[in-house]
Image: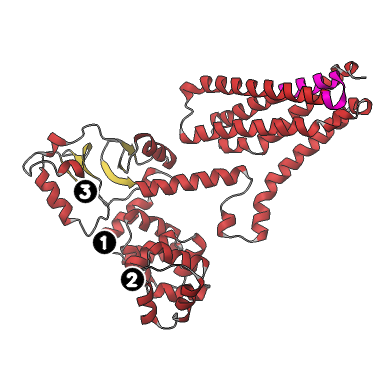
Amino acid sequence: MADFEINDDNIAILIANLDRPEKLRSLVAELHPGDIVEIIEKHLEEDESVKLFNVLSKEVASEILIDLTDESRELLTEKLSTEQLTGIVSEMNSDDAADFVADLPEEEAVKVLDNLPVEDSHEVRHLLQYHEETAGGIMQTEMVSLREDQTCGDAVELIRSKIEEIEEYHFIFVTDREEKLVGIVPLSKLALYKPEIAIREIMDKNPISVTVTADEEAVANTFMKYDLISLAVTDENGKLLGRILHDDVLDVITEASTEDFLKMAGTNDEEFEYGSWINAARYRLPWLVSSLSGGILMAGIIRMMGAPLVHVIALAAFIPVITGMSGNVSTQSSAIVVRGLVLGKVDPDGMFEFIIKEFWVGLAMATFCGTLIGFIAWGLNQNPGLGIIVGLSLFFAMCAASTIGTLIPILLQKLKLDPVLGAGPIVLTLVDISSLIIYFSFAGLLLHLII
């Protein structure tokens, strides 16, 4: 099974041996944990997943549980005894163990913590005190650190002594006698110096770090800004507490991007975890109701300001063009702004320059599209007055849409609200209303040009 391929034939072989533990154990022994996760999620029923999971070693089971969806993880953990759960948790890295225990029912979590080895239990309890969306919530305590007055030889011996405890080494973190972070030493650099050389002589004295209370998205931005694979975490006084690895940050980035995308669509990721049609409808309805409200307002605007339509029915043909193009422009602007705010690329100091840039971008697009649609409207209807009205309306509507799409997310950020909300119904409703008001205002003012 070393070259196992997930296909119908191999899945059938696994299922046929689910009641033969020894044979099943040999079949999955060389499978990558990622393949086992896919098999459990996509190819097995609940009772079949339990049978497969029960033949896995504690080490493999600990990797798999962390990668399963919340729903699958709950189904499996409900079938496991406290002893089994404790054994699995003891094999996890401290950050994964804390996340896993935090998701257990409170009574079961207490039992697991009480049954863990004292040192493991202390580490997990310590990490559980931090909010899950902070640096403390994603850091792990497994790391290699030593004092600045120790030597390269001491560092090598320390690494050897922790070879079974720590899976990935990237840096040695250096502290002073008060355990405050004062430097880092890459492993590649450590190998170049003689054992008697003091660590303080070769360490980088300007280590990058984050405080334990830093937001996880700020941590992700730090990783991307400095192209890191590992990052030290300290308390407010600079005392070294743990480290964050690149794989945990990748999870943060993926989750944040997925959350933002789904939020813009008016739903959330619970649809994937608990995908009943009732829940899906409940999550999506508020977004749709707000859009419906905007539609009702637009209908009211047409009723109040749509007098020119009675005289020139051709004006009605261009309503979808005006509103559609304005909506597209606002979506582009808000998407750029939201992404910039989330990734920290739009900061307070450069906010004005960013807004001016978006204004010029919107102006350029509005000029081109307004001119183009004006000539098209003129040609289709053989009426230059209609071309002027449609062209000017689209120009000003697109300028307004670009401004709204830029400013609303920024305003929400200033109000300490989620800027992603600005890319949804708030912006689209405002843009639809403003584009109609602009269109009918020009049509009313310039109606004499076309009748």
Which amino acid is tagged 3?
Val
The part of the image, by quadrant, that contains residue 191 is top left
Which amino acid is tagged 2?
Ser
Which amino acid is tagged 1?
Val
Question: Residue 448 got which mark?
Answer: none
Which element type, helix, strand or loop, lies under badge 1? helix
The part of the image, by quadrant, that contains residue 395 is top right
Q: Name the residue beneath numbered marker 1.
A: 118
Q: Nearer the viewer, residue 76 or 369?
A: 369
Residue 18 appears in the figure: yes
Q: Nearer the viewer, residue 393 or 159?
A: 393
> Label 3 to label 2, Cα distance in Å?
27 Å
> Label 3 to label 1, Cα distance in Å?
20 Å
Judge the density around disc 2: few (<14), some (14-19), many (≥20) Cα neighbours within 10 Å.
few
Q: Name the residue beneath numbered marker 2.
A: 57
**Residue lying at the far left of the rendered structure:** 196
Comparing labels 2 and 1, the label whose residue is closer to the camera: 2
The reply, left or right, for residue 195 in relation to residue 357 is: left
Give the extent of the magenta segment.
379-395
Residue 380 is inside the magenta segment: yes
Task: Work out which quarter of the rendered image holds the N terminus and state it.
Answer: bottom left
Q: Name the residue beneath numbered marker 3.
A: 144
